Image (cartoon, rainbow, N blue to C red):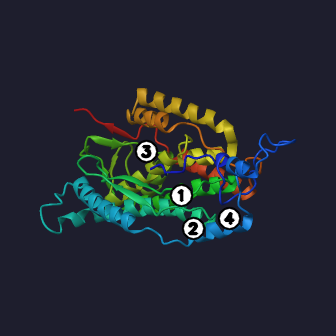
Amino acid sequence: MPDAWPDDSPLHRADPASTDIAPPIRSGPAPDASIDNQRHRMPVFASSDDNDARVASDLQAPIKWRLPLLLFLLTGLTTLMAGALLIHVNPFSSPLAILAGAPFSVTLLAILLVHEMGHYLTARHYKIQATLPYFIPAPPLLFIIGTFGAFIRMQSPIVERKALLEVGAAGPIAGFLVAVPATIIGLHWSTIDSHGIGGPMVLGEPLLLHLLRHWVLASAPPGANILLHPVALAGWFGLFVTSLNLLPIGQLDGGHIGYAVFGERQRYISLTMVGILIGLGLLGWKGWLLWAMLAAVIGVGHPPIADAHVPLTRRQRVIAWLSLIIFLVTFIPSPISILSD
């Protein structure tokens, strides 16, 4: 799920994390020498000490946790229901029937929570104010996994190149580190279907899952389907969500990383990626057309940063390369197909 970042440009407002941006200086007398009049027209920038004190005060403010907790609990309920339905258990058949969905629910929520906390903790490290994760519950009959994902909201703009890259990359990398072992464990518990008893929905296989399947289920005969255990299924969705967030478009995580690396050239990468999604949607999974429309709504551009001229360190370049590799091994050109009778 894309994260909610502030839309206001740091070049158009004074920001508590930077005092490098100054108003334009003009020589000669001001058109109106009245100090009072100029005071209302000219931007005023606080001193570095004042900014540091204000940032520290913001970070020490009480964290609003009630709504995030309520949404998390509701999403836990809807994903429990979804997990039960995915293994053909009616969650309402008995008081404890809903617990059949626990393997799927716990795994999926762990991946999403770690992803969002990666963003949150990295933002706090850079003294950027952010909310706790907001989970979005979804009726399982409407959306089969019981959630539309989660997001955090940045409450102060990110003006540093290194912060933009690291905050954007922290979520996908953290979630990936949970999704991979979950998928491996789930594959060990999965069933080899050599008799064609699987359902009509077939999940696409990213490069990483292809490698993991041949490693964990080496005994599976060629062409056999794998009936995924709920933990493996949650791992699959975790890998898919990771790739969606790393799409190099607009203000998705991948867009933040791309802008930190390429600057204004990232806009052309976004446009190219949207074109690729449209092509994939026309040729295969129609969901890519929805994502292309979403990109058109949120925009392919990115707010500027104040220190675009500052080069990235070797560590930050490694993070950017790692993010690209994760995107390539988790991206699925055709995520879901429905077999016809």
Please give the label number shown on residue 205. 3
Q: Which residue is mark 2?
A: 58
> Residue 338, position in %: x, y?
30, 37
Whichever of labels 3 and 1 marks the residue nearer the N terminus, that label is 1
Please give the label number shown on residue 167. none
Q: Secondary structure at mark 2?
A: helix
Q: Quadrant of the C terminus?
A: top left
Asked if residue 139 lies left or right of residue 168, the reply is: left
Please give the label number shown on residue 51. 4
Whichever of labels 3 and 4 marks the residue nearer the N terminus, that label is 4
Disc 1 packing (10 Å; few <14; some 14–19; many ≥20): few
Whichever of labels 1 and 2 marks the residue nearer the N terminus, that label is 2
> Residue 229, position in %: x, y?
32, 57
Disc 4 packing (10 Å; few <14; some 14–19; many ≥20): some
Q: Amino acid at mark 1?
A: Gln
Q: Which residue is mark 1?
A: 155
